[in-house]
Each structure stands twice: as C-alpha cells, then as structure tokens.
Image: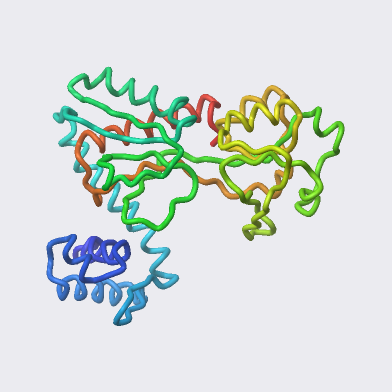
Amino acid sequence: MNRWEGLDEFVAVAECASFQRAAERLRLSSSHVSRQVARLEERLQARLLYRTTRKVSLTEAGQQFFIRCQRLIDERDQAFRAVGDLHATPSGLLRMTAAVAYGERFIVPLVNDFMTRHPQLRVEIELSNRTLDLVQDGFDLAIRLGRLGDSSLIASRLAPRRLYLCAAPSYLAHHGRPHSLSELARHNCLIGTSDTWLFNDNGREHPFKPRGNWRCNSGEAVLDAALRGFGLCQLPDYYVLERLHRGELVSLLESHQPPDGAVWAVYPQRRHPLPRVRLLIEALREGLAQRAESGHVLK
C-alpha cells in the first residue's frame, strides 16, 4: 500500500472546500478524488470531512490531519524541487508587494541580496500598507503580516511575529503600570493601523478597543510617540525589541501576550509557483531566520 495515496486529493479538497474544484485543480475526475479520500478515511478509521450538497468542511480530526499533511506534501515537493533548482536560474520579471516599514527594513534588503546572486532577474517592488489584489494588479508575490483573511491565495510562513504591549518608563512613572487587562481602559493608548488590540486571557483571545488622544497609521510613528512617554502601545517585535533590550521601553502584561503570529509570503498559484517566486520565498525565509537568530526579530 502506498502510504501517500489519497493525501494530495484530501489536501486539495480541504483547500478548495469542494471535490469538484479539487478535481479540476488536480486534473482528475471528481469520482476519483472522492474515492481516494474515502479510502484514506477507511485506512485511518476516522472521518476527515463533513459532506453536504453545498459544502465540504473539515472535522476536528480532519483539521489536525490537514495541517500535518500540508507540511508533509510541502516537504516532499520541496525535496523534488531542490534537485531541479540546482540547475535553475531565476530570470524574468517578478512583481511583489510588502508593507512599507517592514518591507523597507527587512524584505527589500533580502531581495537585493537575492538579486546580486541572480542578476538575470528583474524585480518591481511596491511598498504599501493597503492589501492589494495580487491577481487584479498583476503581482506574483506579497509579504503579509499577522492574520490572513479568507482567500484563494496560497500562504507560506516565513517567520514568527510577536506583539508586545509596552510603554516608556517616563509614562509609567507618571501613570502607573497596568497589572490586569481591566486596567487598560484607564490608560492613554497610542493607536496605529489596528483599532483592536489582542491579548490572551486564560487561553482565550481577548480583544481590546484602545482609546487615547493619539493615532497614526505608521508603526514608526507609534514607536516614536511611545518613546516620548505619550502612552501605551502594542507593536510587533521588529519595532520594539531593540528598545526593550535598551530599557527605553518596558514590556507589560506579559502573561496576557497573544499567541505568536507570522510573516507570510502569499501568491496566486497553488503549490508550484514560478521558480523565481519559489526561490525568492526560500531566500526570504532563510534570511529572516538569520535575523531572528541574531536578535533582530524575536523568535
């Protein structure tokens, strides 16, 4: 028995939420896909999918199995591609987008490093804090931060991303330090691009609507205001980590820190993007991991 049998079909159905669309993606008949998934469920002695006339969704067992199968298939495909990529030379035009501050600080330097190794490649980068439509606007790749919305785009995790609630020592000296989530409402909050701050409360997500006398859609501007002692801020690690190490900011409510998010590479293709896109994603993942190890980004 081939232990891989049915895995590709199951993952395609889970990603498409449809046997028909999965069959079209795999260029197989829907009856073949359905049969392979049914055999897989029989081997596992577990139901992986709920099936109705309108919708296909994952069971709890299916969700756990899906996550692991995605990783297995990605690793398998990467192993095959790695051999072919030994002789591949990225070329042509690659259009990509990223958030302004994160792109300037981390992504563009890594893309430039990649370009020095592959001078045949042409790159166009649009830095924007708007979520651009990759298909409509003709982008091959986007770097996105935090949570991803429901989308037909394929996402590949590049690096972790952790949020910190913090304030300058000068602010805390005048206004005190919050010791519970309920005390946040009494503090001046510096609001950036998000109207909701997220926290962990006994294993559950606790959203908080910050209020204050200062707002700007720039992380760097929020950081500057926090350093001046204007109020509390919640920012990703790459803004505040160095300042925390220096003592210029103080981390607060660490027991309520939300679960780590991620930095994602997203692209329109399914699992086999163009070689230039695939190789750049791998280079970005490796480069961001090295920055994390050197302390620029917290693990």
Residue 110, horizontal then vertical, whole percent: 37, 25
Residue 189 in the image, given as x and y percentages of width and height: 72, 42
Quick check: 264 above or below 20? above
Quarter of the figure with the C terminus: top right
**Picture coordinates of residue 135, whole percent (x, y):** 26, 47
Residue 31 vertical position relative to residue 279 in the rendered view, above or below: below
Residue ID at (30%, 74%): 41
180 left or right of 263?
right
Residue 290 lies left or right of residue 256; in this view the side is left
In the displayed image of the protein, which residue is found farthest to the bottom? 53
At a point 73% along the width and 40% down the height, the residue shown is 213
- Picture coordinates of residue 161, whole percent (x, y): 52, 40
Is residue 209 left or right of 77 when viewed as pictured? Answer: right
Residue drawn at (35%, 40%) of the image: 142
Q: Is residue 145 above or below residue 28?
A: above
Quadrant the N terminus occupies: bottom left
Residue 83 or residue 12, whichever sits in front: 12
Left or right: 243 as drawn, with respect to 131:
right
- Which is nearer the eye, 238 or 32? 238
Identify the residue at image location x=70%, y=26%.
227
